[in-house]
Structure formats: C-alpha cells, structure tokens
Amino acid sequence: MKIGIIGTGYVGLTLGICLSHCGHQVICTDKDQEKIRSLINGNLPMHEPKLLEMLASNNVSFSTHIHEAVQKSEIIFITVGTPQSENGSCDLSHLKKVVEEIANSINGYKIIVIKSTVPPKTANSIKSSLKKLTKQPFDIISNPEFLRQGSAVYDFFHPDRIIIGSDNIEASKVIGKLYERITNNILYTDNTSAELIKYASNSFLATKISFINEIANLSEKIGATIKDVEIGMGLDQRIGKDFLSSGLGYGGSCFPKDIRALIQVGKESFCDMSIAEATDKTNTMQRQLFLNKIYSKFNSNLLGVTISIWGLSFKPDTDDIREAPSITIIKELLSKGVKIVAYDPKVKKSSHEVLNKIKLVQDKYNALVGADALLVLTEWDEFRAPDFSKIKVPIIFDGRRIYNKEEIRRLGIEYIS
Ligand code: NAD
C-alpha cells in the first residue's frame, strides 16, 4: 500500500522502515529539515539497534513535504510527539497542526491512523474538527504503539498485540491487513477504548515499578533481601518477573508523561485516580531517596566533591535522556557544588543543556579519575562486568543494583544500592 508517515521520530521512523520492509511504499515526513537531511544521507538521527542496517536495505523516501505525502498516500500515520503540558495533561498541539495540514492537502478518501499516544476521546474530537475543515471522505483509526526504545525493530515484528480502534470495521480491517503477516493477536475495538488501552497499559507497568520500589524501601528498613523478594514474586506467573526490578524508577518519554496525562483525564472526568497518583509520587520520591543516600554519606557537604556517573540514558540501548533519572540527579548535585564527570555509551553532549555543565568522557574508566564516588544510573550491559581492578573509587552508589554487594565490598569499595 501507499503509506505516508507524519513525524519521523523513534516511532515514525521505525514504523516507516519496517512497513517498507514488508513491501509497502512508504514516505516518511517530518518538519525537522535537519533530521530529514540526515536520513536522506543514510544517517540515523538517534541510536536504535538494527534500525541503521534496516534503513540501508529498504527503500523508504524521506521528505519535509507533508502535503505531497498526504496526496500520494492511501494511509496516513500520525506519529508526532504528544509531550506533557504544564499541568500534566497531554499537549496535542503537534497533532492538531498535522490535522490542519492534512485538511489543507487531502485530495480523496484517506485512512488516517493516530499512532501517537493520545488521551481517550481524542480521535473522536479530531474526527469532528477534520469534518469541519474538509469535504473529502476519511476514516480515523486509533492504533497505539507499544514498541520499546532499544528493541523497537524486534518489537515491530514480534508484538504482543495490535490494537485497532475505529467506528468503521472496513477501515479497521485495511489497517489490520498491514499487520496480518506479523501477528494474529489483533484486537478490533472502538477509538476511545484503543486510546485507553495504551494509557492503562503504560500506567500499569509504571505501577509495577513503583510498587516494587515501595517494597524495596520497606525491605531495606526491615532487613529483607529485595533481590530475593523480586525473584520470589516474579516466579508467580500471575505476577511475572518483568518490571519488577527496584531502583531509581522509570523515566523516558512515555511512562512519566502518560501516567500524568491519565491522572488529568481522570480529574476531568471526576474519577478518582489514587493508584496512578501514588505511582507518580513514588517514582519522583525514588530519585530523592537515592540523593539522600549520597547526602548522608558526605554529611551534606558536597562542595568540591567529584562524582563520576556511569549511564545517562533513561534505560540501556538508547541515547534518549528525556525524563531520565540522571538529569534530575545531575541538576541536584550541581546545585550542591559537585563536579561531575560522566560516561554513557551513546548519549551525546548536545542532547540536554545540563550536559554542558558536566564533563562527558569517552571512556568509562577515565570518568573515574580523581572521583570521590561512582554513581551507576543506567544498567548498560558494559557496566555489569567491568574490570574492577580499574575501579579505584572509595564508594559506589548503584542506582540499578547491578553489582553483588559482597563482591564490591571485598574489593575494599563501599557499596550503597
Ligand atoms: P519523537 O519526538 O522522537 O518524534 C516526533 C517527531 O514528530 C519529531 O521528529 C518532530 O519533529 C515531528 N513533528 C512534530 N510536529 C510535526 C509536524 N507538525 N509535522 C511533521 N513532523 C512533526 O517522538 P516519539 O518518541 O517517536 O513518539 C511519538 C509518539 O509515539 C508520542 O505520542 C509517544 O508518546 C508515542 N510513543 C512513543 C514510544 C517511544 O518509545 N518513543 C513508544 C510508544 C508510543
């Protein structure tokens, strides 16, 4: 099929390249000229495993001309960002802009698929506004995305399920056909339910993380071994082991904003959202608890202390630092007069202004020179089994609990996780 994609970020680019791999004619568009230029030159604007080789071996077109993509395509996927606005609700301004652009370009029947994460009832309201802007026929499908950064290509070809929401089953089936060879687990539903499935799923996973963090904090107080508690709970198939690792909590461009948007939707609908609120609160607190451990060790006197950080991205296998715990922690430590030297396998200095205030080095052992402590903030594989003989810091604060406490202590290094 002829497919246009509007918004060529983590989601849009993965979708475009993978659909092209399935044999469709895909044109990926974005308003960011730099990004499109880089893609035309065969470079990925972000780090995502497997995507670069897929880009090289597939025939996707890239353009900043959204008008052209709308006119040439039978199906238009909208994959623009839906960030958090100031009051925590979902900011739909990019999506609304795209809808206006579609209205100005539409030249016949189109299936418009909202893949961006949007609050329940957004598709219905977009449908009404688009009807006022154009006489051309269209259907609006809600097809939320569930990929994980770091394994986005794998996730495209091995989804647990595909959710397709609309009020026109014929249009839904056209979109279902795109996924037919990938999975049989396709749930057809209405737009609002599809939208809520996405928020409910992300909020449930975030809740699992906050729950195990709460149990970890209790475990620490009463002298239980949280690792064993996690394993023991995870062995229960009704619970499952995923998202049951205590630590610094979740970050990234999805969980934090999606749970806050869900809370806002609840407020607007006069519905109590205590569980979602507690999940968000526990997650925020978890970063502070980690900082408190550092403050307590240095008797709250951090002026002139040098701290080395391993890991800046919000999780391994991505260069994304949106809402990463590292950013909160760096800002706090800088405000206390700490000097920071950091290493991350993929994060670039330009990705956040706060990184201009620290030293970013290319070698993890170089980051340790002269450091009074090492903080592990992202569980990249390369940090799991380092050459411990090269780690000369007096203390490690391990925000991801990747080391064995006894082993580190045998090396004469104090270990706080
Ligand atoms: P992103 O920020 O990486 O990409 C969004 C792209 O949209 C940007 O390149 C931006 O320039 C472009 N854009 C914005 N306005 C535009 C316009 N008017 N015209 C053309 N292009 C425009 O975002 P992302 O991480 O790919 O996320 C996209 C959506 O998918 C969000 O709603 C997000 O919540 C959701 N989602 C993301 C993930 C993830 O892991 N990143 C997973 C599931 C769902």
Image (tube, helix red, strand yellow):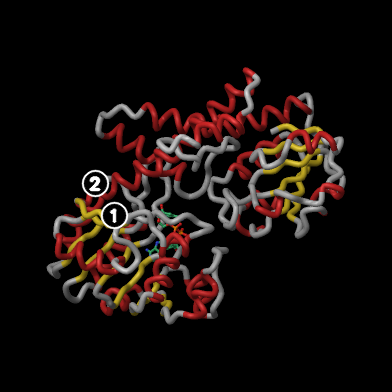
Q: Residue at x 76, y 52 (%)?
A: 359
- Secondary structure under tag 2 reads helix
Question: Does residue 197 lie above or below 212 as drawn?
Answer: below
Mark 2 vs mark 1: in front: 1
Ligand 1 resides in the quarter of the picture at: bottom left
* Crowd tier of the residue under label 2, counting other residues whose Cα lies within 10 Å: few below 14, some 14–19, many 20 or above: some
Q: Whole-percent x and y of residue 399?
A: 65, 38
Question: Does residue 347 lie above or below 239 as drawn?
Answer: below
> Residue 118 versus residue 202: which sits nearer the camera?
202
Q: Amino acid at mark 2?
A: Ser
Q: Residue at x 41, y 56 (%)?
A: 81
Q: Whole-percent x and y of residue 235?
A: 50, 36
- In the figure, residue 326 lies in which quadrant? top right
Quadrant location, the C terminus: top right
- In the figure, residue 295 lies in which quadrant? top right
Q: Is residue 229 left or right of residue 188?
A: right
> Residue 394 versus residue 82: which sits nearer the camera?
394
Q: In this figure, which residue is indicated by the disc labeled 2?
A: 193
| Marking on residue 163 | 1
Q: Earlier in the sequence, mark 2 or mark 1?
A: 1
